[in-house]
Image: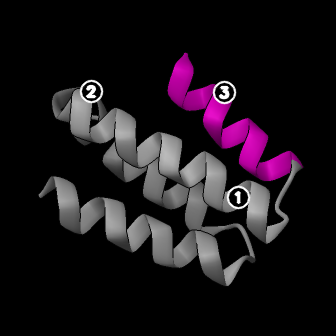
Amino acid sequence: VLIKELIERLKVDATDSQTAKHMIQLLELGMLAPKLIIQHLSTLSDELRNLESYVVRNCVLQIVTELT
């Protein structure tokens, strides 16, 4: 549920500063509970890749490299 909420917020507010804030939250969640994020990584990457923001794509790459 938390992951879906983060994705929805990113879809609604894709300004770079807000996006970075939400991606940092997602990365922090991944560091605290990596198993939670890893099991949803393919869904997350598919959803987040569809966003146009360059910042989001870089953050997705950062999260994937940190967690794997």
Specify start and end residues of the magenta stretch as a single range: 1-12
Badge 1 element: helix
Q: x%, y% of residue 60?
A: 44, 65
Disc number placed over residue 5 in the picture, else none:
3
Q: CA distance from mark 1 to mark 3?
A: 13 Å
Pointer 2 residue: 36
Residue name at image x 60 percent, y 29 percent: 4
Q: CA distance from mark 1 to mark 2?
A: 21 Å
Badge 3 element: helix
CB-based contact (under 8 Å), mark 2 and mark 3: no
Q: x%, y% of residue 59?
A: 48, 68
Left/right of residue 57 with respect to residue 37 in the rendered view: right
Q: Amino acid at mark 3?
A: Glu
Badge 2 element: helix
Left/right of residue 39 with respect to residue 63 in the rendered view: left
Pointer 1 residue: 19
* Disc with the residue nearer the chain's start (1 vs 2): 1
Left/right of residue 28 with respect to residue 39 in the rendered view: right
Task: Look at the image and tell me in which quarter the C terminus lies.
Answer: bottom left
Q: Amino acid at mark 2?
A: Leu
Left/right of residue 17 with respect to residue 58 in the rendered view: right
